[in-house]
Amino acid sequence: MLVLFETAAGYAIFKVLNEKKLQEVDSLWKEFETPEKANKIVKLKHFEKFQDTTEALAASTALVEGKLSKNLKKILKKIVAKDAHEQLAVADAKLGGVIKDKLNLSCIHSPMVTELMRGIRSQIEGLITGLPSREMAAMCLGLAHSLSRYKLKFSPDKVDTMIVQAISLLDDLDKELNNYIMRCREWYGWHFPELGKIITDNLTYCKCVRKVGDRRNFASSDVSDILTEEIEEDVKAAAEISMGTEVSEEDINNIIHLCDQVIEISEYRTQLYDYLKNRMMAIAPNLTVMVGELVGARLIAHAGSLLNLAKHPASTVQILGAEKALFRALKTKRDTPKFGLIYHASLVGQTTAKNKGKISRMLAAKTALTIRYDALGEDTSAEMGAENRLKVETRLRHLEERGIRRISGTGKALARADKYQNKSEIKVYDPSGDSTLPAASKKRKIQEVEEQDAVVAVKAKKFKAEMKETNLEEDEPVKKKKKKKEKKKQAEEEEELTEEVPTSSAVENTEKKKKKKKKVKDEDED
């Protein structure tokens, strides 16, 4: 049996001397404890040395991919074809299948072969003569580096780590610049407070302070290379009537030194931005065309690398950078965010608030395609990114025009542009934002007002009806009293009449009695 073994120095073919000992797989390692024992098991038959590292890398990559290289094919034809009746032990079963198909040689791969390869590797210096150990170690190290680069498809132009570091440094520089400029304005503002309102640009402010220094020097100094004529006149006029405090020369020197730092950092920032722009166009040109250099670099930095970003689906790319809001929305069972870092892309910024979600979703889908093309494709052109950007712009235009047609009221004609009215940029505090109650929509507010008006009207009607009923109830007892009084009066009148009749009859009776008495008296007298 023959054994095919590849080293960093070249191909080696060994012949097995004692095949019986190979049957004991568990104890095979004992036969390779020393070079003397190893020489009793296997013997070097042929050794083909590599010419350089390039040839060694080509042979190694062919074996890794399970292919048969030209050099190995020649060796097998020369050496092994003579002993065609013997089996060839190989470390890779896939390679054994290729050799069997192309050279019609019987190959074997088993746990026994694996143990045999491990034993040969442990005693390779004693089995292969003529190779110093130091030279062998150098060959192994060089081939290991070359093979690692090949596996990673290493290229100096495809290093996305530089982009991650550059965008992180750019953000740090922006923070530091803001702190330095605020300190410079506040510090020099004690001496010349009016200058901060006249010059709004931070870099121009620092250059002006560095050139002039004390405010009393503005009248005699020429700053026309920094400021325009109008601003220069305003600055000189303000310096004469300034309300700032007097400062010493040492204070002015420290302020000027701070201005130097701000100007240097600003210049380095512009240089770093140009570097980042060039690196992005070299590593991810299609992604740069789609979303821009800064947004693309931040996406790569957030994912860790361009390859990791390519593994993300479009839905993840869309909300990348808004993980905190996403999990908060899932926890509180509210609407999830529609965009993350991709919100800062120019295409999303051009859209109205109503269509931002739709455009960000479509942009994320196209961006995911361009990321995979940049990470895994071999072409370095930006044609695919330009095509996808055109599609997104077309979709954006379609959405905007459809919205205008709806407002105009006609399906075909576009709405006329309204007259431009300049709106003040001064923002007024809105106290409604302090409320913790959920904000209701305008339609809901109108419905609530209408319902309240209807309830008030119903209540007013009920109140009027109740008032009428109460008035009627109050009038009825008054009428009853009047009727009772009238009845009483009638009864009294009737009683009076009845009393008058008997009195008259009684008078008549009394008169008759008196007459009778008179007659009786007269008769008695007679």
Image (cartoon, rainbow, N blue to C red):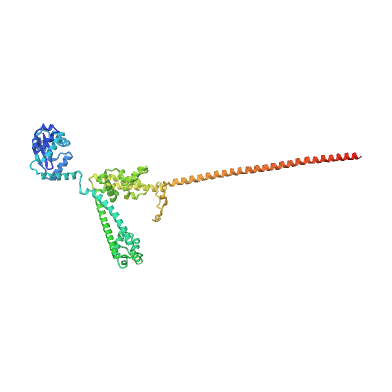
In the figure, is residue 195 to the left or right of 164?
right
Which of the 4 quarters of the picture holds residue 335? Answer: top left
Q: Residue furthest front?
A: 524
* 56, above or below 424, in the image: above
In the figure, is residue 70 to the left or right of 353?
left
Estimate the x, y position of residue 452 in percent, counting from the top left. 49, 45
Instruction: Please identify the quadrant where the C terminus is shown.
Output: top right
Q: Residue at x 26, y 49 (%)?
A: 164
The foreground one among 25 and 11 is 25
Estimate the x, y position of residue 258 in percent, counting from the top left. 28, 60
The foreground one among 445 and 403 is 445
The foreground one among 325 and 390 is 325
* 208, above or below 355, in the image: below
Which of the 4 quarters of the picture holds residue 423? Answer: bottom left
Does the image show residue 102? no
Does the image show residue 503? yes
Instruction: Please identify the quadrant where the N terminus is shown.
Output: top left
Q: Residue furthest bottom?
A: 220
* 25, above or below 252, in the image: above
Numbered marks: total: 0
In the figure, is residue 274 to the left or right of 58?
right
Which of the 4 quarters of the picture holds residue 248? Answer: bottom left
Q: Residue at x 74, y 42 (%)?
A: 496
In the figure, is residue 55 to the left or right of 296?
left
Estimate the x, y position of residue 425 in percent, counting from the top left. 38, 56
Q: Residue at x 72, y 42 (%)?
A: 492
Estimate the x, y position of residue 448 in percent, counting from the top left. 47, 45
